[in-house]
Image (spheres, rainbow, N blue to C red):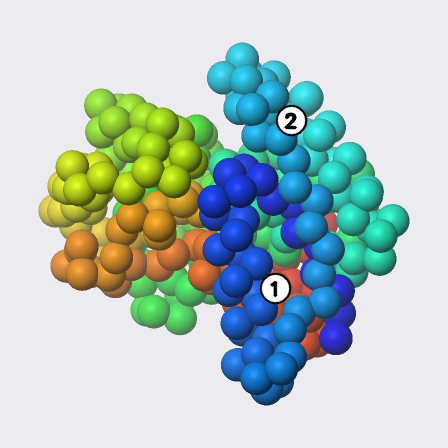
Amino acid sequence: MRTIGLIGGMSWESTATYYRLVNQGIRDRLGPLRSAELLLASVDFGPIEADMRAGAWDAVGARMADAARRLEAGGAECIVLCTNTIHCVAPAIASGSALPLLHIGDAAGDGARHAGLRTVGLLGTGFTMREPFLKDHLASHFGLRVLVPDEQRQAQLHAIIFEELCAGILREPSRAAFREAMAGLVAMGAEGILLACTEIGLLVQPGDATVPLLDTTALHAAQAVAFALAEGPAMGQLS
């Protein structure tokens, strides 16, 4: 079994979900007493979030590359970045380590393609919905048309993620806000919704939308399990 290297802590609430899903995936495939060989580099999200707000993405990339190098030194054989938003510095991580980076965009794109989707709505942090790093990856690598809510809705969802979900707070009015956002995307033509923030799945369930929901956390964890079991090449390695 290959050893998975997780970069987590952004937030630790969703990193705990990664740990659970990866180990469940290994157990389901190999037997009830089996679990994943993995290493976890869990970072302090506070300074990283401050750098994000300040637009200091080079500093964020340097922190992530350092975490990847520590995992490599510890014996990890791939890097799994347990967050959507920080994939905006994926090139810095890839250049800072010789290990393959399993890109969450590949996991999401494969999931959408397997579901037969061509147009998807994307929900995530304001950074993920606004910036092109994930939308362009999905469009260029998988031919997907990607829709996002308007700026006002983006701001509302961003606040829910950072002020509530990252702190483990789940509120029904916030679930209703996500339901409204998803309904709006469906009205725009979305055939499915990508939950492209690793915390959204803590709040939103399949019954909250009229179209399929693709949780990038679950898809990414499954990608890591496939890598660990050597079921193909180093999926997601950036060139």
Residue 119 in the image: state x and y as whole percent: 29, 54
Seen in the image, is 168 located left or right of residue 4?
Answer: left
Q: Does 11 sit above or below residue 19?
A: above
Residue placed most toward the observer, 175 or 78: 175
Q: Disc 1 marks which amino acid? A: Ala
User: Going from the N terminus, do you reach mark 2 or mark 1 first?
Assistant: 2
Specify the label residue 117 is tagged with. Answer: none
Residue shown at 62% from the left, 82% from the top: 33
Disc 2 packing (10 Å; few <14; some 14–19; many ≥20): many
Q: Where in the figure is residue 69, as x and y percent of width and height?
A: 81, 42
Res 148 visible = yes
Q: Which residue is farthest bottom?
A: 31
Which residue is tagged 1?
Answer: 224
- Which quarter of the figure has residue 94? top right
Under mark 2, the amino acid is Val
Q: Residue at x 78, y 48 (%)?
A: 71
Marks 2/1: CA–CA distance: 23 Å
Of residues 26 and 225, the one drawn nearer to the viewer in this rendering: 26
Secondary structure of the residue carrying tag 1 is helix
The answer to whether mark 2 and mark 1 are in CB contact below 8 A is: no
